[in-house]
Image (cartoon, rainbow, N blue to C red):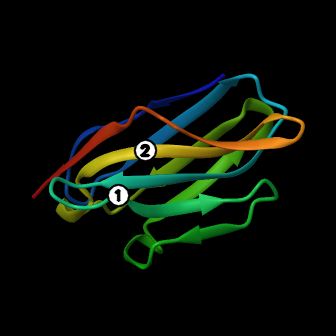
């Protein structure tokens, strides 16, 4: 089994910054893509940003230029640096990782979620 543990959420004023972390542990042969998703009340979960094992990134248009995703492969950890936060960024943020947990098999695992609240 694999666990993803997130940290770094909280309450911040508009214009402020937060840094989320997500560490994977357990039966890991390797990790392919890692990413961050978010879900606001009454809305569907949406992709925020993803990063491949080689460092290629992809962002939702609304966060481009404000958020930066990065990863430390040696620590099986993905980060999300969030700057210039807006009230509409308020949501539960989830990390996800596509983990090769057996030589022939890749499973997507999810973190438990961390609340980010941006006040106006």
- Tell me the element at label 1: loop
Please name the residue shown 61% across and 43% down the image: 78
Look at the numbered discs 1 and 2 and tell me whether their residues touch, using CB distance below 8 Å: yes
Residue reaching furthest to the bottom: 61
Q: Position of residue 7 (x, y in %)?
A: 44, 30
Looking at the rendered image, the quarter that the C terminus falls into is bottom left
**Image check: 77 left or right of 101?**
left
Is 27 placed left or right of 107 in the picture? right
Q: Which residue is mark 1?
A: 45
Q: Residue at x 76, y 23 (%)?
A: 27
- The answer for how far apart the CA atoms under marks 1 and 2 are is 9 Å
Q: Nearer the viewer, mark 1 or mark 2?
A: 1
**Mark 1 Cα-neighbour bin, 10 Å: few <14, some 14–19, many ≥20:** some
| Residue 5, x across and y down, in percent | 51, 27
Q: Quadrant of residue 85?
A: bottom left
Q: Is residue 97 above or below residue 37?
A: above
For image coordinates 33% across by 63% down, the residue present is 84
Q: Position of residue 12 (x, y in %)?
A: 22, 45
Q: Position of residue 34 (x, y in %)?
A: 63, 50
**Residue under numbered circle 2:** 94
User: Which residue is depicted at the point 87% across and 41% down?
Assistant: 104
Q: Earlier in the sequence, mark 1 or mark 2?
A: 1
Please give left or right for residue 38 compared with residue 58 in the image: left
């Amino acid at each position: 089994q694999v666990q993803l543990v997130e940290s770094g959420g909280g309450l911040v004023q508009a214009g402020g910054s937060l840094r989320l972390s997500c560490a994977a542990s357990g039966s890991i042969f390797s990790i392919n893509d890692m990413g961050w998703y978010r879900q606001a009340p009454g809305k569907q979960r949406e992709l925020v940003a993803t990063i491949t094992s080689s460092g290629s990134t992809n962002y939702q248009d609304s966060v481009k230029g404000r958020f930066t995703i990065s990863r430390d492969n040696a620590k099986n950890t993905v980060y999300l640096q969030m700057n210039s936060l807006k009230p509409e960024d308020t949501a539960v943020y989830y990390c996800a990782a596509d983990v090769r947990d057996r030589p022939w098999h890749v499973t997507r695992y999810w973190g438990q979620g961390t609340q980010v609240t941006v006040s106006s």
